[in-house]
Amino acid sequence: MSGVMKRMGMIFRAKANKALDRAEDPRETLDYSYQKQLELLQKVRRGVADVATSRKRLELQLNQLQSQSTKLEDQGRKALALGREDLAREALSRRAALQQQVTDLETQHTTLQGEEEKLTLAAQRLQAKVDAFRTKKETIKATYTAAQAQTRIGEAFSGISEEMGDVGLAIQRAEDKTAQLQARAGAIDELLASGALDDPSGMAKDDIQAELDRLSGGTDVELELQRMKAELAGGTSGQQQAIEGGTGQGQQSQQPQDTPRFDKQ
């Protein structure tokens, strides 16, 4: 069972891989990759903006602390001028604490400024990479589209494409079916003509029957013709006898005249 399951899993993965390969369009894949790069570039730019915002806040805090430090220094100077050394010492102590904060903020500002410069440079490099990928992507898409169109045209001319193959098969099936029907019709005609098959309508006749019908029809005509002659002969028999008698006398009268002519010769 384990071997069967492994084999089924392999077949399923192979079928799925083939189906995915058919469904995959390189142009769509390139567009998706370009979209992901744009999203990454947008994140980098957002990071640069966040670092710049933090740097700007530190600068504002530094300005405020520096203003307070300057103010405390002025206040200590005025207190010292008025003979209030204790107030002057307190003002200078507070100023010293502010200076420590200023030093820490300046260190953070320097760090943020370095990070901002790095992110800015990375964003610029990524932007250049995305632009180059976009150019290459459009070039590949155009080349792929041209190759696909050329392949389809070639397949259409050669008749090996799926659409043209279906058309060719349909034509071949139609021609085969037509030839089969023609052969069947010819065979049926020959069988009917030879008498091997009976015609249920009684219309079809073989050659012998057709010849007998022709002779029978001709005999009927001859009989009808003889009957008509007999009727005509019965009505004119007296006239024919008179004509025949006259013809006989003429021949007898001519013979004596001809005899002396033969004797002379």
Image: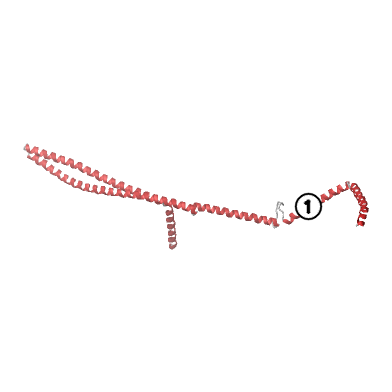
User: Helix, strand, or loop for circle 1?
Assistant: helix
| Quadrant (top left, top right, bottom left, bottom right) of the C terminus | bottom right
Residue 27 visible in rendering: no
Q: Residue at x 20, y 47 (%)?
A: 110
Q: Which residue: 60% across, 55% down?
A: 179
> In this orientation, which residue lies closer to the viewer: 263 or 43?
263
Residue 72 drawn at (x, y percent): 12, 40
The quarter of the picture where residue 98 lies is top left
Color scheme of the displayed model: secondary structure
Q: Is residue 215 left or right of residue 21?
A: right
Q: Residue most toward the front?
A: 264
Instruction: Give the residue number, with chain letter if any, for mark 1.
Output: 218
- Please state the horizontal and vertical placement of residue 43, each as a whole percent of the image: 30, 47
The residue lying at 13 percent from left, 40 percent from top is 70
**In-front residue for pair 188/42:** 188
Q: How many marks?
A: 1
Give the percent coordinates (x, y) of residue 261.
91, 55
User: Which amino acid, by three-letter code, is at mark 1?
Assistant: Gly
For this rendering, which residue is in front, 1 or 171?
171
Judge left or right: residue 41 versus residue 190: left
Q: Residue furthest top?
A: 82
Q: Nearer the viewer, residue 224 or 177?
A: 224
Residue 68 drawn above or below residue 135: above
Q: Few, some or many C-alpha atoms within 10 Å of disc 1 (few <14, some 14-19, many ≥20)?
A: few
**Does residue 186 appear in the picture of this structure?**
yes
Quarter of the N terminus within the rendering: bottom left
Task: From the top left corner, tell me how far across and down residue 83 is, in percent.
Answer: 6, 38
Residue under the image location 50 percent in, 52 percent down: 164
